[in-house]
C-alpha cells in the first residue's frame, strides 16, 4: 500500500516561495506507470490540480500556475517536492500530494487518484 505524507511550513509570507515535500512509502517513485501529483484546495473552493512528475522524471504543470510552479524529486529519499514562487494570499489552501497509475493531467476528482496524502494547510499572510 502506497502512503504519502506532506511536510513543509504552514505559514508563508507574500512574495516568498512556498516549498512542500511529499515523502512516499510502500513503493518507489520511479516505479513504471506511477505519476506523482500536487493538488490544492483553497477554502470554500474545489480541487485545483497543480502539476505532476512522472516515474521517469518528466513534469507537467497547470498552465495557469506554470510560470510559478516547479516540481522536482529526490529518488534517494523517495520524495518529490513542490515549489510555488511569488505567493499571494490567494495561494492559501490545503495542499495535497497524490499518486495516479498512469499519467493523468488535470484531474480534479478524488477518485482520479489511487492514493492521497492527508494534506497540509498553507496560509499566506504577512
Image (cartoon, rainbow, N blue to C red):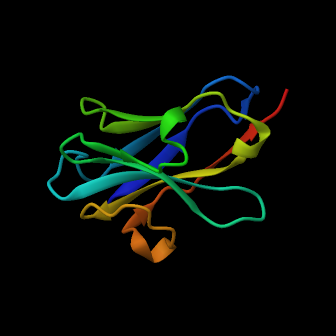
Residue at the image position 67 percent from the left and 23 percent from the top: 16
Residue at the far right in the pictured view = 126
Q: Quadrant of the N terminus?
A: bottom left
Q: Position of residue 56 (x, y in %)?
A: 18, 43
Residue at the far bottom in the pictured view = 111
Residue at the far top in the pictured view = 16
Question: In the image, is residue 76 above or below residue 3?
Answer: above
Horizontal arrangement in the rendering, residue 76 relative to residue 2 (left or right):
left
Residue at the far left in the pictured view = 32
User: Which sits in the foreground, 64 or 8?
Assistant: 64
User: Which sits in the foreground, 28 or 83?
Assistant: 83
Residue 1 appears in the figure? no
- Snapshot quadrant of residue 106: bottom left
Q: Position of residue 72 (x, y in %)?
A: 36, 33
Q: How many marks?
A: 0
Horizontal arrangement in the rendering, residue 125 relative to residue 38 (left or right):
right
Q: Position of residue 17 (x, y in %)?
A: 61, 25
- Snapshot quadrant of residue 105: bottom left
Residue at the image position 77 percent from the left and 58 percent from the top: 43
Horizontal arrangement in the rendering, residue 36 relative to residue 92 (left or right):
left
Residue at the image position 40 percent from the left and 68 percent from the top: 113
Q: Position of residue 10 (x, y in %)?
A: 70, 36
Q: Quadrant of the C terminus?
A: top right
Question: In the image, is residue 89 above or below residue 52?
Answer: above
Residue 51 appears in the figure? yes
Residue at the image position 25 percent from the left and 42 percent from the top: 58
Amino acid at each position: 500500500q502506497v502512503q504519502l505524507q506532506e511536510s513543509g511550513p504552514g505559514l508563508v509570507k507574500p512574495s516568498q516561495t512556498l516549498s512542500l515535500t511529499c515523502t512516499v512509502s510502500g513503493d518507489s517513485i520511479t516505479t513504471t506507470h506511477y505519476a506523482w501529483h500536487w493538488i490544492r484546495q483553497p477554502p470554500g473552493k474545489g480541487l485545483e490540480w497543480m502539476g505532476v512528475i512522472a516515474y521517469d522524471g518528466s513534469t507537467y504543470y497547470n498552465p495557469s500556475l506554470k510560470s510559478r510552479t516547479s516540481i522536482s524529486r529526490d529518488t534517494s529519499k523517495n520524495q518529490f517536492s513542490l515549489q510555488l514562487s511569488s505567493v499571494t494570499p490567494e495561494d492559501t489552501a490545503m495542499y495535497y500530494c497524490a499518486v495516479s497509475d498512469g499519467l493523468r493531467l488535470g484531474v480534479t476528482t478524488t477518485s482520479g487518484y489511487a492514493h492521497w496524502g492527508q494534506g497540509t494547510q498553507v496560509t499566506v499572510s504577512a
